[in-house]
Amino acid sequence: MSIIAASVLAFSFMSDSTYDAKITWWGIIVGLLSLRIIDTVIWYMQNRHVRTPNGRLALWRFSFGCILTAIAWGVYPVYFFDKMEIVEFSTTAIIISALAGGSTTVLAGSRHLSIIFTVILVIPFSIVGLSSVDKSHYSLGFLGIFFCAIMVITGMKMARFTLEAIKLKNVNFKLLDELKNNKDQASIVNLELKQATTQLNSVNRDLEQEVIKRTEKIFQLSNLDTLTGLRNRTAFTAELDNLIEKSVHNGNPVALLFIDLDGFKKINDTMGHQVGDRTLIAVANRLAAFSDANRCGRWGGDEFLVALSYSDQDTAMSIACAMMTSIAQPINVNGNELYLSASVGIALAPVHSLNAADLIQLADLTMCEQKQLGIRKPRVFSTELKSKIEASQLILEGLQHALEKKQLYLCYQPIQCAKDNTTWSFEALLRWNFDGKFIGPDVFIPLAEKSGLIKEIGAWVLNRACMDAIHWQFNQTAAVSVNVSVIQLMDDGFIRLLDNILRSSGLPPERLHLEITESTFVDNEKKIRTQLKEIQSRNIHVSIDDFGTGYSSLSQLQTLPVNYVKIDKAFVDNIEGKGDAIIRATLFIARELNCKTVAEGVETREQALALSAMGVDFLQGYYFAKPMKNEDLIIWQNPISNFPV
Ligand code: C2E
Ligand code: MG
Ligand code: MG
């Protein structure tokens, strides 16, 4: 605007006399203004991207430029006054006033500069006007002073206003900055939050997965058998209860199968637990094929349970037969072909019971019965079996109090030397008078063994027999043969018990013989061997009872430290038939192994003579004497005087 105004002023009122001066003035003002424009452009270019530029020096340059411009303008009316017409003077006054008016706004950013600029612009032409005698000039000069005063006041006001506006703007900028910062921080926080949420979500997902996994694990630990993956006792019983409840509701029968493997223990003992475990897994898989996974359970050891819904007696029998066939198929473990069989007992709901635990017990008892009888067929629980079981329970209850009620006593049966018919030993045989009813040891001993009562009863027998024997004045050389159950023998305290009894009774150990039934040697052979060695180291002799009736025999006889083999009554009974060959074979082996032989159940003279002729060392049986009470032994006279012939 200044350049335009200066150009208009300089060239509009140009005359020959002022030409050079006006061109010079114009040149100065245009040059000055151009420099200022350049300075502004350079400053702008330099600070374009600077958020808060250092404006102090630029401000000084700007102020300096302004003042020089004002001076240049101020000079014009003073210098050219003499050659000016009133029109030019008026135009100059108007232009300068307009510039001064504009400066109050344009330079309002600096109060001092705005005032100085106005004053430098307006005062020179006002003074020149006032000093003139011409009225018009004077009036314009006066108006100039007045205008200058107003402009100074306006300039001051504008400056204050602008300063505040700038301050406000800066504050706003700051606020905006802070706001932006806050916004930036907020977005950072938001981003972090977002990331955290994503992480949290993934952690949550992982956690959920972990919870599911753990729940599964807990379920497995608490419900599944760790080896086979079948239901464990608790879980199976609960499932069976559920099934029974549903079946009662629907009116459909449920069959429970109790499966026990035959001969598994042997696999475990001879081939190791690893093979045993893999065999159990294989059996479990075969059984699981017959029912839902949650209806197959492992009861313990080699015992399994299968529940069949919608299954009556016939269906259960057919499935049980199929299971037995499946188990009988060879099992391949580590390249070994293993053969197993199983005994199966069946109980039905609702016929036999509506309670899972009872049903399992009934199926178990049925299975045990079948196993004992050695019948390789499944069996369904029956009332006949029920009365047998009840009778057993009655006996067992009675047996628990038999000792304290003094219902147990010992009878002694002589064992004769085959060579000279002298009494070599007396076998102690337990008797039980159960409230006036005689119960045979064949009935109550297996029950006592099963219930664990045998330890207490056996200890009593051993003590009684030793006490009786030490008082046999009629025969101070004969031994006493005591039957000992394998369960007693396996007990860690047995040897200590033996020592205590020998010490307290005063019976020389060589007068004590122990008879252990052969069939029971099968299990835990190693422990039995160490126990037998302990016994023999005390000079107590050991017999294998009922030899030939058990599973083991010959191979075990080689390794077990025994002194006598007792040939079972069954072979003596059959001495005229196949028994003869068996007895001869037994005698041969016994001789090879340095064992003496005893034949039991000798009822006739013929048997006695035949056995003696065969080389049997000792004979026992009704032919010589039946078992007698201790008090009757003193008066016992050997009725066989002409033996051997
Ligand atoms: P065992 O040790 O083989 O005893 C021989 C059994 O045959 C006895 O039966 C005896 O009375 C019977 N006996 C002996 N000679 C003859 C005979 O000529 N003819 C016939 N028919 N029988 C004869 P018992 O006393 O009934 O004992 C049966 C089984 O009970 C015993 O067989 C033994 O295994 C067991 N037992 C008896 N007492 C005890 C005991 O105190 N502890 C243990 N653990 N078992 C015992
Ligand atoms: Mg015996
Ligand atoms: Mg016997």
Image: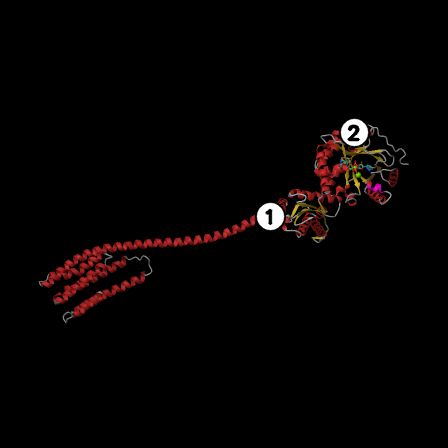
Residue 51 position within the rendered picture, expressed as x and y whole percent measured from the top left: 33, 57
Q: Amino acid at mark 1?
A: Gln
Magenta run includes residue 581:
no
Between 334 and 19, which is closer to the camera in this rendering?
A: 334
Residue type, mark 2 in image: Ile
Q: Are marks 2 and 1 in contact (CB under 8 Å)?
A: no
Region rendered in magenta: 570-574
The percent position of residue 594, horizontal first and vertical second, equals: 82, 41
SS of the residue under disc 1: helix
In the displayed structure, does residue 59 sit left or right of residue 206? Answer: left
Q: Residue at x 18, y 64 (%)?
A: 95
Q: Marks 2 and 1, Cα distance to the nearest angstrom?
A: 61 Å
Q: Find disc 2 in the rendering and name its residue.
A: 470
Q: Is mark 2 within 8 Å of ligand 1?
A: no
Q: Residues within 10 Å of mark 1 (few under 14, many from 20)?
A: some
Where residue 220 is drawn, which disc sits there?
1
Q: Can the viewer see residue 269 in this picture?
A: no
Q: Give the residue furthest to the bottom.
A: 16
Going by the image, does 83 lie left or right of 495? left
Q: Is residue 572 magenta?
A: yes
The quadrant the C terminus occupies is: top right
Q: Nearer the viewer, residue 272 or 211?
A: 211
Q: Is residue 92 above or below residue 619?
A: below
Inspect this view and state whether residue 553 appears.
Answer: yes
For marks 2 and 1 on the same chain, the one whose residue lies earlier in the sequence? 1
